[in-house]
Amino acid sequence: MAVFEPTFESLYGFEAPDWYRDAKFGIWSHWGPQSVPMQGDWYAKGMYVQGTPQYEHHLRTYGHPSVFGYKDICALWKAESFDPDALMDLYVKSGARFFAAQATHHDHFFNYASDVNRMNSVNVGPHKDICALWQAAARRKNLPFGITEHLGASFSWWRTNKGADTYGPYAGVPYDGNDPAYRDFYHDNYVHVTNDPSVNVPWYTTDERFHAYWKRVMYEIIDKFEPDFLYSDGSLPFGRHWANKPQKCEDDRAYDVGLEAVAYLYNKSIQKHGENRALYLQKNRGPEIYRVGVLDMERSVLDETSPYPWNTDTCIGSWFYDSRVQYKTPALVIEILVDIVAKNGCLLLNIPQRPDGTIDEEAKYILSEIGAWLRLNGEGIYGTRPWRVCMEGDTRPASGKEEVTAWKPGDVRYTCKDGNVYAFLMNAQPGGTVTLNSFAGANVTGVYMPGAGNIEFGRALGVLALRLPDKLPTRFTNMIIIRGEGL
């Protein structure tokens, strides 16, 4: 039984498992104590930066961060209405085929019973093993279960808790991150203390003690959960870190800790299944990096089809629950999903949870609409592969973005499966004519629209002309199934 060595050369033998290539759509619980104030992402950082909205909210709601700090926010998190089974039922009904739970964010609070970090959801706050509860719920639904970790950046990211106000009644009073009693939680990261935006503080620290700690935590997560996938919020630790800039590995030794964790993940899967069914997600687009696992694109998509499966992670709103933000519409989520799948990707969608563990009515509505659409059109999503052409039309997301607000009638995305081609009409017009220009050499024998039936068509010189029904089956993206030979 072949195993992986913790080297780039060995890990280049990784291939994405079939379950992932077929699943296409997953749900993510990006949840933790930072949901308590309901003020959005990066609260644990922003509450220690004087003048930011999160600092002002914290000061006026809880008190000054020298007196009431993030550790105290953690104690307020109760998750008292958290029902993972009911939520998982809802997510499966929405069409999700895999699920991810956040083990730890940059705030260094762990959502599971850790032997490494006392500040975890069993000892503090909810007094529940959040990840274990999520895993049990996912297993009941036979969903692949993944863990996301954001710990790698924590040492640098959370330098703000060592600061102090520069003006006002608390000027010069150290924040509670300086409390020696909580040094293990807030990090011994004085080397990074600065709130000056002109000072470049790296995403990943060079502190080798923290590197060893990160590896210890990854091994604990892998041993406890044997996840089907592991996600890091950044590049493969701990080398060059800028997420979306292709880079070469000038010094492989910088990645030793990360490579060891990835090899450990895969080898655990081999021990369990006789083959590797796990995958590792990270955000560096440099080919030397992403070939050890699957490339993840946060809130963005690739411009063209990739020969390797890849992933987008995004959210309907803010990463942590934010009562102020506007959510994506169901139409937009569906369009993002279609664009990604046509280019050989999968979508991992975060549904923000309130601090009590529930999701709001708007989120339920969005999930319901996605589920109804997938029940009608899922044949062209699940288990598909990229066709020889992934798209027609000029409209596409801007570089580094995921959203398109104005699709044109000629914009099409394609997938294929079992000899059929699936064409997603991004802006179909009732009763209109659609011209598809990518069918040279094909003998098209039938065109069918789920919910509407057979579609009139004509073909000449590789062009397929369609007459759409006067009433389309969905107010979102409509799909047609093209059958024939030579497709």
Image: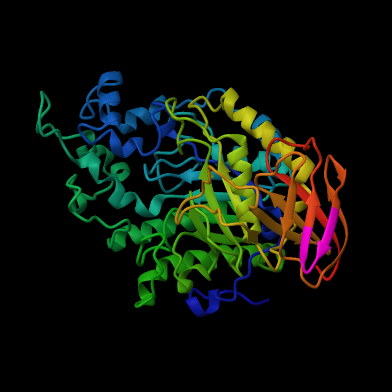
Residue at horizontal 30%, vertical 63%?
208
Q: Which quarter of the image is occupied by the N terminus?
A: bottom right
Colour convention of the picture: rainbow
- Locate residue 117, reporting x and y percent: 40, 45
Indicate whether residue 463 is drawn in magenta. Answer: yes
Range of residues picked out in magenta: 457-464
Q: Quadrant of residue 245?
A: bottom left
Q: Viewed as shown, does residue 11 lie left or right of 83? A: left
Q: Is residue 267 magenta?
A: no
Residue 323 spot, x, y in % from top left: 44, 25
Q: Is residue 334 left or right of residue 294?
A: right
Task: Identify the residue at horizontal 71%, vertical 37% (top origin).
Answer: 371
Main secondary structure found in the magenta portion: strand
Q: Nearer the viewer, residue 55 or 219?
A: 55
Q: Is residue 450 above or below residue 272?
A: above
Q: Quadrant of residue 458?
A: bottom right
In the displayed orientation, state which residue is furthest to the top: 61
Q: Is residue 130 visible?
A: yes
- Given residues 62 and 419, the one toward you in this image is 419
Q: Quarter-wise, where is residue 368 in the image?
A: top right
Residue 427 screen position, x and y as percent: 65, 44
**Residue shown at 38%/44% (left/top)?**
108
Q: Is 419 located above or below residue 227 in the figure? A: below
In the rendered image, the quadrant that contains the C terminus is bottom right
